[in-house]
């Protein structure tokens, strides 16, 4: 259920103190993202939350406050963030109250670090193409607000309109195979050419290939990152991130300056699943973070699709586990588009000479060396090299390390 927010919708156009309240609620140690959302859901604005926290500390202690919840346990007991109220003698009625433990975290003057973050965020948002989007803002992704713990604030860089569109996530292994990356790019390109934005996490491997495929069509791509939006990780994808910011959109819920930490990426994954109508998993080992994204999608009531792989490949173990759990199997981009109810645009047929056509017919899907091909087909080496080059330029075969070639799926 979407939260009703009565505070100002866009911090980039509002005063500093209002933004600081949003940032403080989202970044207060001990409250956690679940607790912050529950407080906002109950009190409707950060200002009301802090007013309630200060009033709670000023009130006489109640019997059930005799043993207050330790600060370090607060995230494990979100039910105590807002607790059923007790009878108030003055009011004569029961009402919900903020818990004493939560009030101790949130009451008092604004911390200096939040002041600094608010100043930095406003300066960042003043730059061209940068946006701050609050929960309840018209620009907030509509499907994301319906997950169990939507982020209170998003930093976005690029085309903000993409956040309003229906989208599909394409995720998978960082240590992906050449075929896996080719598949990811092919599926993402098909989605984008059908005008469906592709969302992924900017990681190496499948994520990067999915973004590249998304950029090849009008649907474009959105990268949800696990760092501050001013910190790109991994650095090897810095050029890709810049291109996404120019042609698509970068998104983060983490404060400016936040560095990469292992625990950030599962948190990031729930946003990827929450922003999409469906998630496609391509190559996932038994403990792949992509499984977290898939399960988050299921919990949010979204579809999960899986491209199966070899039963002998460790990178297929997680994919096959998802299929056993009920995920839908797809083998081609056309199947995925059909299942999503999307129309595949007509694609031009690659132009090849007769020799290239013969070579493609004889080339299987397993990698093979150029010398072995020449022997098998009894083609002159010069003709074979020319035909292989034509197939490679047409996007039909891929040149592998060591001089081997492999026919790509779909051809």
Image (cartoon, helix red, strand yellow):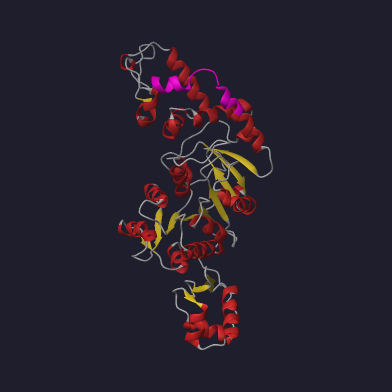
Q: Is residue 164 visible?
A: no
Residue 313 pos. (x, y %):
37, 63
| 33 over 85 or under it: above or below | below
Residue 171 pos. (x, y %):
46, 55
The residue sitting at 56% across, 42% down in the picture is 138
Q: Is residue 85 visible?
A: yes
The residue sitting at 55% across, 35% down in the picture is 255
Quadrant that contains the N terminus? top left
Q: Is residue 107 highlighted in magenta?
A: yes
Residue 16 pos. (x, y %):
63, 27
Q: Is residue 40 highlighted in magenta?
A: no
Bounds of the magenta segment:
100-116
In screen coordinates, is 113 left or right of 103? right
| 408 over 283 or under it: above or below | below
Q: How many numbered discs sit on the rendered protein? A: 0
The residue sitting at 39% across, 26% down in the picture is 72
Work out whether residue 285 or residue 146 is closer to the camera in this orientation and state it: 285
Work out whether residue 182 or residue 188 is closer to the camera in this orientation and state it: 182
| 184 over 349 or under it: above or below | above
Work out whether residue 405 or residue 148 is closer to the camera in this orientation and state it: 405
Residue 6 pos. (x, y %):
53, 31
Magenta: predominant secondary structure element?
A: helix
């Amino acid at each position: 259920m979407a939260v009703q927010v009565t505070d100002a919708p866009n911090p980039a156009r509002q005063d500093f103190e209002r933004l600081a309240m949003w940032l403080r609620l989202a970044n207060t140690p001990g409250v956690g993202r679940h607790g912050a959302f529950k407080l906002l859901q109950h009190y409707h604005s950060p200002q009301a939350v802090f007013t309630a926290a200060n009033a709670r500390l000023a009130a006489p202690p109640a019997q059930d406050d005799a043993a207050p919840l330790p600060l370090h346990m607060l995230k494990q007991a979100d039910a105590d963030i807002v607790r059923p109220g007790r009878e108030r003698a003055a009011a004569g009625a029961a009402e919900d109250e903020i818990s004493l433990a939560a009030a101790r975290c949130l009451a008092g003057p604004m911390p200096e670090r939040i002041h600094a973050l608010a100043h930095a965020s406003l300066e960042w948002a003043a730059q061209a193409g940068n946006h701050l989007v609050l929960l309840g803002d018209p620009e907030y992704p509509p499907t994301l607000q319906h997950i169990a713990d939507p982020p209170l604030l998003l930093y976005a860089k690029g085309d903000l309109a993409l956040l309003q569109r229906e989208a599909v996530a394409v995720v998978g292994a960082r240590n992906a195979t050449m075929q896996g990356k080719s598949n990811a790019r092919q599926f993402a390109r098909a989605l984008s050419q059908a005008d469906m934005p592709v969302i992924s996490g900017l990681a190496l491997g499948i994520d990067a290939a999915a973004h590249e495929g998304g950029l090849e069509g009008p649907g474009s791509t959105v990268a949800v990152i696990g760092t501050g939006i001013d910190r790109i990780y991994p650095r090897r994808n810095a050029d890709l991130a810049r291109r996404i910011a120019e042609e698509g959109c970068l998104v983060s819920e983490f404060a400016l300056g936040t560095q990469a930490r292992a625990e950030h990426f599962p948190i990031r994954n729930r946003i990827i699943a929450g922003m999409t109508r469906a998630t496609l998993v391509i190559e996932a080992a038994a403990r792949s973070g992509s499984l977290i994204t898939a399960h988050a999608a299921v919990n949010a009531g979204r579809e999960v699709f899986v491209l199966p792989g070899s039963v002998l490949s460790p990178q297929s173990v997680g994919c096959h586990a998802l299929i056993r759990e009920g995920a839908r199997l797809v083998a081609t981009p056309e199947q995925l588009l059909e299942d999503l109810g999307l129309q595949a645009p007509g694609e031009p047929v690659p132009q090849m000479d007769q020799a290239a056509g013969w070579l493609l017919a004889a080339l299987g899907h397993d990698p093979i060396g150029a010398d072995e091909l020449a022997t098998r087909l009894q083609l002159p080496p010069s003709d074979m090299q020319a035909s292989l080059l034509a197939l490679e330029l047409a996007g039909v075969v891929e040149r592998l390390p060591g001089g081997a070639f492999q026919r790509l799926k779909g051809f």
